[in-house]
Structures are given as structure tokens and as C-alpha cells.
Amino acid sequence: MYIYVKIGMNEQLIKSLGLLNVELSKAVAGQEIQFLDELLRWNQRINLTSVRNRDEACEKHLVDSLAILKYLPDSGRLLDIGSGGGLPGIPLAIARKGLEVTTVDSVGKKIHFQKHLKRLLQIKNLKPRHERLLPLGEDQQIDHPFDFAIARAFSSLDQLLELSLPRLRPGGKLLAMKGPEGKRELAELELSRFVRFCTLGGQYSYRLPSSRSERQLIVFIKN
């Protein structure tokens, strides 16, 4: 019974992403579901996610994370800020083997889980780091610069810019993943503070296929 459910979820993941114009192979979808199941299993012992229903977690974690694949190239260096249980960094690393993904979180047990996933699924392009990022970018373990920085439902836009800009190469991009509040945050952002350092690269709105939850992707490009 469990095998049939698992295959069905693989197919549902592929179908849902297809509705967002994102392609995923069956092999990669299988690995993504392995990650999700391990996340939910560990979540019974340590707090990694508030979503405990498997179907709901598939959309709110996997589909949500992988929806931005079409805005990323096949290779480069990516920094996931405030990665938590590995979202969106681990799903992106699984889907794009050419991306070097560094995930950073200040909570040690969450990075411990990520290192376990790295070993379990042999994700060679994943580098989990237990560290608290500071705006000045003086990190002990993290090499600079990055081609992309990404953050999912983490902090305000002005704080994200302060954290990411020192770590990006010129021309590098911050991809801020937000819910409906993204429009308000962008309208309230004092761009004059950052105009010397970055430009707004784009704002994209979409909805998750099943729940119809609204999502905003806001892109900034470092000058």
C-alpha cells in the first residue's frame, strides 16, 4: 500500500509543477519525496515544520520550493538564507546537480538534519552551515561571492538585502520568496537606501495549484 501511495505522490508532484511550467523527471521526483518523508519523520522529534499532513507538505514545501526552478540556471553558487529544515535549498540542490547550494541556519538541530539528508541522499552539491549571518558578511565558514541568494518566508526585504548584498557578486541576484505580503513589503521598501547597491530585477506572482495560495517572487540584482 505504501509503495502505491508513494508512486502516486511522485506523479502528483510532477503534475503540479507542470502546471507551473516546471519540468521534473521521475527519478528526481522520487528523491524529492524521499526528502519530504524524512523531513516529516524527523519532525516528530524536532520542530522542523508546522505542516504535518503529507499531501499538504508536498505542495507547501516541495512544489513551493521547486516553483522557482525556471528562474535559476543549471549551475552557479546559491546561498539559502535561514534554511530551517532545508527549504528551499535541499529541493533545489536535488533538482539541479550543477548548483552548489550552501544552506545557512542559526539552529544547530536543523543543520544536523540537513547534514543527515546530505549523507542519506548523497547530495554532493549541498553544503549545510550552522551559522548566524550578519549584515557585514564576515562569515567564518562561507566562501564569497555567490551568484544567487534565496530566502523563503524569512525576514523583511530590507533585512534580506542587508544580509545578501555583501555575499553576492556584482550582477548576482537575491530571490525573495514571499506570500501575499510581498506586494506590501515591496511598496514599503525604502529603495533609496539600496539604489547604489542594487536594482529591482522583477516581481512575479503565481498560485500553488491545489490550495491556490498566492506567492510572490521578488528579484533584486546587485549593481
Image (cartoon, helix red, strand yellow):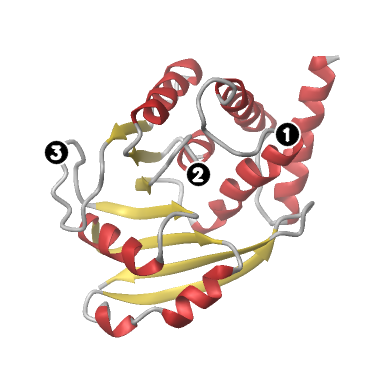
**C-alpha distance separating marks 3 and 2:** 23 Å
Which label number is shown at residue 53? 1
**For mark 3, what is the residue?**
140
Question: Where is the N terminus found, in terms of image quarters?
Answer: top right
Marked residue nearer the N-terminal end (2 or 1): 1
**C-alpha distance separating marks 1 and 3:** 38 Å
**C-alpha distance separating marks 2 and 1:** 18 Å
Compared with residue 200, is residue 115 higher up or lower down, i.e. above or below? above
What amino acid is found at the position of numbered circle 1 in the picture? Asn
Residue at disc 3, secondary structure? loop
Name which residue lies at 29% across and 58% down: 164
**For mark 2, what is the residue?**
88
Name which residue lies at 78% across and 38% down: 12
Task: Specify whether 100 is left or right of 205.
Answer: left
Dot 1: within a 10 Å radius of its alpha carbon, few (fewer than 14), some, or many (20 or more) residues? few
Dot 2: within a 10 Å radius of its alpha carbon, few (fewer than 14), some, or many (20 or more) residues? many
Mark 1 or 3, which is nearer the eye? Answer: 1
Which label number is shown at residue 31? none
What amino acid is found at the position of numbered circle 3 in the picture? Gln
Dot 3: within a 10 Å radius of its alpha carbon, few (fewer than 14), some, or many (20 or more) residues? few
Indicate the position of residue 73 as horizontal and vertical percent values. 45, 52
What amino acid is found at the position of numbered circle 2 in the picture? Pro
Indicate the position of residue 117 as horizontal and vertical percent values. 47, 22
Task: Specify whether 98 is left or right of 178.
Answer: left
Indicate the position of residue 107 as horizontal and vertical percent values. 35, 34
